[in-house]
Image (cartoon, rainbow, N blue to C red):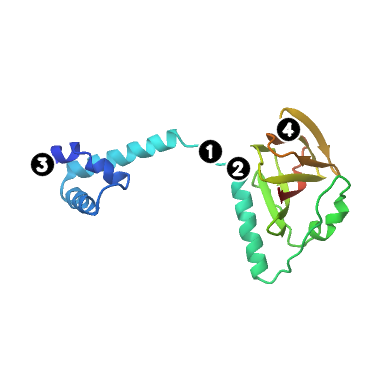
Amino acid sequence: MNSKEFIESGILELYAVGMASITEQEEVIFRAQNDPAIREELLAISKSFEFVAMENSIPPDPIIKPFLMATINYTERILNGEAITEPPLLHQHAAIDDYAPWLNRTDLVYTESVPVFAYIIGYTEKVTTAIVWLKEKAPQEVHDDELESFLIVEGSCNIIVEGAINKMAAGDYFAIPLHKNHSIQVTSAIPCKVILQRVAA
């Protein structure tokens, strides 16, 4: 098989997406090392796949990374000997002072350079509690298997549920109903600092 036939065979495309057999992979590598035309075609295919992937990419949920980093941080703290604590469950009469032992931690440092910053203060199989700072907003989401609630600590925000705007300020509590589309829009000049709790439904 000459270079033109090899290029037109589709093997290079299979190789680029990881679907070529071991024998085909070895042949592509050998030919690419020894044939500039095949090497250039393989590079062009890879670039075209990358372009298509970028054009059709979906931006990640901006909440995922902060909570992943918070989970790593929490795990490291526990492994380093931090005592496991269980912050009280949020409810309509919850007060900011109820969370003073966690809010007043000396190691609780907010990273201002990120749009969302989370610090987990309690975790069990059923309940996750975190202190969260929002600079501008939290995107729309729906929870089908956990009840999410908030206690505003500093700043203000609108919690929007199915289009209904709920204006929140420091000391206010709000619970998100299951299966309801909701988002948060910060309305204060400072980040909105909240106690966020997610309870398995």
In the image: residue 194, left or right of residue 38: right
Sequence-first tag of 1 and 4: 1
Q: Where is residue 132 in the image (x, y as percent from the top left)?
A: 72, 49
Question: Which quarter shows the N terminus?
Answer: top left
How would you rate the neighbour count of disc 3 (Cα within 10 Å): few for under 14, some for 14-19, many for 20 or more?
few
Q: State which quadrant residue 171 falls in.
A: top right
Question: Contact (CB < 8 A) between labels 4 and 2?
Answer: no
- Give the residue number, with chain letter if any, for mark 3: 2
Sequence-first tag of 4 and 3: 3
Residue most extreme to the left: 2
Mark 1, mark 4: which one is toward the viewer? 4
Sequence-first tag of 1 and 3: 3
Mark 4, mark 2: which one is toward the viewer? 4
What number of labels is visible?
Answer: 4
Question: Contact (CB < 8 A) between labels 4 and 3?
Answer: no
Mark 4 vs mark 2, CA separation in Å: 19 Å
- Amino acid residing under circle 1: Pro
- Give the residue number, with chain letter if any, for mark 1: 59
- Give the residue number, with chain letter if any, for mark 4: 161
Q: Position of residue 137 (x, y in %)?
A: 69, 38
Residue most extreme to the front: 201
- Amino acid residing under circle 4: Val
Mark 1 vs mark 4, CA separation in Å: 23 Å
Question: Residue 6 has which mark?
Answer: none
Mark 4 vs mark 3, CA separation in Å: 63 Å
